[in-house]
Image: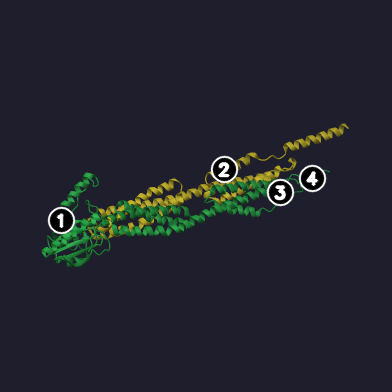
Amino acid sequence: MALAALLVSCSRHPLPNVDGARRAARNAIQAVRPAAPKKARLIEQLVALAEVATAAEAAAPWWEGSVGRTEAAWLRVVRAAREATATVRAAQSQARGAYATLYPEVRNEVVRAQAEIGEAGMDRREAAAMQQALMSLKLAEKLAEAGRHQQAIEELREARDGAGVVHRAWGALHARLGEPSNLRQWKQWAEMTIEESLRAGDTAILVDKLRRRVTLYRAGRPVAHFPAELGANGLRRKEHSGDRATPEGMYRVVQVKEPPETRFYKALLINYPNDEDRMRFALGQRRGSISARAGIGSLIEIHGDGGEGRDWTDGCIALTNEDMDRLFAHVRVGTPVTIVGTYGR
Amino acid sequence: MRKSHVFVGVLLLVAAVLAVGCAKPPQMEIDAAKAALTAAEQVEAPKYAAEAWDKAQQGMNAVNAELEAQNAKFALFRSYTKAKQLIADASNAANAAKDAGIAGKEKAKNDAMAAIDAAKAALTAADGLFAAIGKCPRARGAKEVKKDLGTVKGNMDAMKAQVADIDAKFAKEDFFGAKAAADTLKGQVDPVAKDLEGIKTKFKCK
C-alpha cells in the first residue's frame, strides 16, 4: 500500500514548454532596459513569479497540480514583455522620425545664422548664441548616432534657440536699415552730398553700408564704385569706442595718410565724431544705454588692406589697395565723406 | 502485545524525530542571497552591468524554483543540498553583479571626468595662448591678427559658458551626455587653439 501511495504521488502533470516565453522575456528585458528600466524590472519580477509557479507545478502531486497556473503566470510575462517592447519601440520610432524631420530644419537655421553673423557682425550675446547653436547641433548628431534620439531632439531645440537669437538680432538690424525715417534721413544726406559735389564741381565720397559700396562722385555724377568692408559690427550705427560699428553721418577728410603714417597701405582720416555724434553719445550716456566709462571713439578712416570678403575692421571702411590708389588720386583734405545705412542709387 | 505496542511506539518516535530533524530551508543563506541581489540593484547593476545582473537574477530564480520544488514534497523527502549550492551560486552572482555595477558606473564616471578635464584643459590652454598674443605687440599690431582676435574672444567666452552645462550633466550622473558634450566642446576648442598657436609661433610671442 505504501508502495502504491509512493508510485501515485510520483506521477505529475506534464508541464507546458515555457522556453519560448523565457526567450521572449529575456529579449524584451534587453530591448526595454536602456529606455524604460522600470518596465524591464517588472518583467524580471513576473519571470521570477512564473519560475516559482513552474517549479511548484513540477513538484506538486497529480491531485494538487494545476497546469493552468503555470500557463497563466507565463502568459502574464509574455503580455508584459510584448507591451513593454511595443511601447518602447513605438517611442523610439517616433523619436527617430521626429529627429529626422527636425534635423534638416535646424541645420538650415544654424547655417543661416552663421551667414547672418558673418554679414552683420555680432556682439557677445550673438557670439555666445551662435557658439551654443553650433555645439548643440554637433552634440545632437553624436547623440543620434548613439541611438539617443530623444536627447538629440532636445539638443536640436537648443540649437534652434541659439540660431533664433542670431536671426532676431539680424532682423532688428535689417529692420533699422528699412525704417522709413532712417531711409529718409540717409537719402537727404546723400542728396546733399551729391548736390555739394555738383555745385563745387568737385569730388565727394558716398558710402552705402548695406551694399558694402564706396562711390566716388565728381561734379555730382558717380564715376567709380568700390566694394568695401566695414567694421565687424559694421551694419550697426556707431555708438562708442570699441563697438566695431561703422558710423553714419556727413563727414570730411581731415588727413590723407601714406606709409609710415598708416599701417593699412593708405588711409583717409575723417572727422568722426562730428557734432551730431557727440550729441547722440551724450544722450546715450544720460539715458544709460552707453556706459559712463565708454569713450566716443575716433580714428575712423577709409583705408587699404581690404579684400578679405568680410567685415573685419574696428569701424573703418576698408578697400583693396588697388582701389585705394584709384580713390587717392581724386581726394584731398576737405573732401566730403557721407556714410549712410543705404540709399536708393 | 506489549512488545508490539512498544515497537509501534518506537517507530512513531523515530518517525517524529526524523520529521523534526529533517531538512529545513537554509533561511539565513536565502536572506543573505536576497540582500546581495538588492545591494546589486542599488548600485545600478541593471544599468551598468546588465549581463552580470541578468545572471544574478537567473540565479535567484533557480533558487526560488528549487525551494518551491522542495517545499512541495513531503517533509521526509525534502533535501536542501541542491538549494544550498544554488543559493551559494546566486549569492556569488549577485556579489559579482554588484562589483560589476560599481566598476561599470565608476568607469562611466571616470570616462566622463577625463573628457571634461580634457575639454577644460584645452580651454585653459587656448585662453593662455590668447592672453600671450594679447601681450605681444608684434602680433597685436599685425593687421591679420587684429581682424580676428575680437571674434576669437567672443567665441571663447561662449565656449567657456558651456562648461557649466557640462558640469550640470555630470552632477545629474548623465555620464554619457556629459562625455559627449565635453568631447564636442574640445572639438570646437582645438582648431581655435591651433590657430592661436600658429599666430604665437609666427610672431615669436612669449
Label 1, label 3: how far apart the Cα atoms are: 101 Å
Tell me which numbered mark, 4 or 3, is placed earlier along the sequence. Answer: 4
Residue A112, percent from left and from top: 35, 59
Please check whether the numbered discs 4 and 3 fall on a single chain.
yes
The residue that mark 3 highlights is A67
Name which residue type carries label 3: Val
Asked whether residue A261 is in view, the answer is no
Name which residue type carries label 2: Thr
The residue that mark 1 highlights is A271
Please check whether the numbered discs 4 and 2 fall on a single chain.
no
Label 1, label 2: how far apart the Cα atoms are: 80 Å
Closest to the observer, A326 or A199: A199
For label 1, the SS is loop
Residue B89, percent from left and from top: 62, 47
Tell me which numbered mark, 4 or 1, is placed earlier along the sequence. Answer: 4
Q: Nearer the viewer, mark 1 or mark 3?
A: 1
Q: Nearer the viewer, mark 4 or mark 3?
A: 3
Name which residue type carries label 1: Asn
The residue that mark 2 highlights is B38
Within 10 Å of the Cα at label 2, are there few (<14), some (14-19), or many (20+) other Cα atoms? some
Seen in the image, is A240 located left or right of residue B157?
A: left
For this orientation, the residue located farthest to the right is B1
Q: Chain of mark 1?
A: A
Within 10 Å of the Cα at label 3, are there few (<14), some (14-19), or many (20+) other Cα atoms? some
Q: Which mark is residue A6?
A: 4
For label 3, the SS is helix
Name which residue type carries label 4: Leu
Residue B46, percent from left and from top: 54, 48
Identify the colour of chain B in the image: yellow
